[in-house]
């Protein structure tokens, strides 16, 4: 015979242990409504001692509301998304909300499945780094407030908080041009999203302003696999040996580029210069440090959460809003004058 599961500790158990009414215990635990500080301390101590865990889902069903916010991101392995989630969580926690983090690995089918999971949890709002417009469309059609972050796919349906990728890429390319580089390779993994399109547009705009002809042979499309950036750069350099600089359009590609340059025994920056989009800690730990476009990633997540909370509270109404944050460029030792 299997053992019986232990009885769930209820808010009534906590109230009895703390010597207060269940309603007082609820106010002390949720922060919704007044409870004296001494009562809060007593109730929280009793909850910890008994191992009380609030059933947020059941509470949501009862109130027809929820303090949960869904966060759907594209790649948990990428430090960018970890920093983005950290910014979101800081704001949500301060407002008394909990974050439910789900990952789709950049796959459309998984993205829709995760969106349905959030619907099943009855979240009132969600923050998404979208793969397509389908997840945002599904959620908004069910009355969920959505903020797209980092890139935008459902412009007419929901708010978006974005980094100006075009500006960042333009400044990075201008930096290389100012050092005398004219054969600048550009590695990009996608052109379907606002991020990739913006970065290519910024690269081309800088070339155009400097009256340097755009050469499509210097643009390499990179797959999403771990070795794809190195392979793409190897093929490009084999065909275009006169390249003097490489611009990797995100941090994962920059890592692959760095490895391929090392494999070829090309010295950075003496033999070839390197700039990247996305500034991560490893870029300042290698020698030479990598010149990079730095995105305000934590602030990006925080602003998306603030915008969502404003929608949930009714403070913000009206048509979808689009907000832009400006990146900065950090010149370091990986670039030099020709």
Image (cartoon, helix red, strand yellow):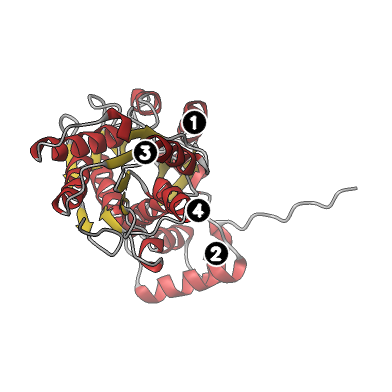
Residue 297 vs residue 39, the one in the foreground: 297
In the rendered image, which quarter is residue 216 located in? top left
Identify the residue position indicated by label 3 in the image: 129
Which image quadrant: the C terminus? bottom left
Q: Earlier in the sequence, mark 2 or mark 3?
A: 2
On the image, the x and y values in percent for residue 314 come to: 21, 40
Cα gap from disc 4 to disc 2, whole angstroms: 62 Å
Please state which of the two labelled residues, at mark 2 or mark 1, is closer to the viewer.
1
Judge from the rendering whether residue 327 lies leftward or rightward of residue 257; answer left or right: left
> Which residue is pictured at 21% across the width and 39% down the height?
203
State the SS at label 1: loop
Instruction: Report crowding for label 3: few under 14, some 14 to 19, many 20 or more residues within 10 A (C-alpha).
Output: many
Please state which of the two labelled residues, at mark 4 or mark 2, is closer to the viewer.
4
> Which residue is pictured at 35% across the width and 24% down the height?
137
Please state which of the two labelled residues, at mark 1 or mark 4, is closer to the viewer.
4
The answer to whether any part of residue 256 appears in the image is yes
Instruction: Report crowding for label 2: few under 14, some 14 to 19, many 20 or more residues within 10 A (C-alpha).
Output: many
> Which residue is pictured at 47% across the width and 31% down the height?
111
Residue 131 vs residue 238, the one in the foreground: 238
State the SS at label 2: helix
On the image, the x and y values in percent for residue 271 come to: 34, 56
Judge from the rendering whether residue 306 lies leftward or rightward of residue 280; answer left or right: left
Cα gap from disc 2 to disc 3, whole angstroms: 40 Å
Identify the residue position indicated by label 4 in the image: 263
State the SS at label 4: helix
In the rendered image, which quarter is residue 313 located in? top left
Q: Are marks 3 and 1 in contact (CB under 8 Å)?
A: no
On the image, the x and y values in percent for residue 109 come to: 51, 26
Cα gap from disc 3 to disc 4, whole angstroms: 34 Å
Identify the residue position indicated by label 1 in the image: 107
Judge from the rendering whether residue 321 lies leftward or rightward of residue 236; answer left or right: left
């Amino acid at each position: 015979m299997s053992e019986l599961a232990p009885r769930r500790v209820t808010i009534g158990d906590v109230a009895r242990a703390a010597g207060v009414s269940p309603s007082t215990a609820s106010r002390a635990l949720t922060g919704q409504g007044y409870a004296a500080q001494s009562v809060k301390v007593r109730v929280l101590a009793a909850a910890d001692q008994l191992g009380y865990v609030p059933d947020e889902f059941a509470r949501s069903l009862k109130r027809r509301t929820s303090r949960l916010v869904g966060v759907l991101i594209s790649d948990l392995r990428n430090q960018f998304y970890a920093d983005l989630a950290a910014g979101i969580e800081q704001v949500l926690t301060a407002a008394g909300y909990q974050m439910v983090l789900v990952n789709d690995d950049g796959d459309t089918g998984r993205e829709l499945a995760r969106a349905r999971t959030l619907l099943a949890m009855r979240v009132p709002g969600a923050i998404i780094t979208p793969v397509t417009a389908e997840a945002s469309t599904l959620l908004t059609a069910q009355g969920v407030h959505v903020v797209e972050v980092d890139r935008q796919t459902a412009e007419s349906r929901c708010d978006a908080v974005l980094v100006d990728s075009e500006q960042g890429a333009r400044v990075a390319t201008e930096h290389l041009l100012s050092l005398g580089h004219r054969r600048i390779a550009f590695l990009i993994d996608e052109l379907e999203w606002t991020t990739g399109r913006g970065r290519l547009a910024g690269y081309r705009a800088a070339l155009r302003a400097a009256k340097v002809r755009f050469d499509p042979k210097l643009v390499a499309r990179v797959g999403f696999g771990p070795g794809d950036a190195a392979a793409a750069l190897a093929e490009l350099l084999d065909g275009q040996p006169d390249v003097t600089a490489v611009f990797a359009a995100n941090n994962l590609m920059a890592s692959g580029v760095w490895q391929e340059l090392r494999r070829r025994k090309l010295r950075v920056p003496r033999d070839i210069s390197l700039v990247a989009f996305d500034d991560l800690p490893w870029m300042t730990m290698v020698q030479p440090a990598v010149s990079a476009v730095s995105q305000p990633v934590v602030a990006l997540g925080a602003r998306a959460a603030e915008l969502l909370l404003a929608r949930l509270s009714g403070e913000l109404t009206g048509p979808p809003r689009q907000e832009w944050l400006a990146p900065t460029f950090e010149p370091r030792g990986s670039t030099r004058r020709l």
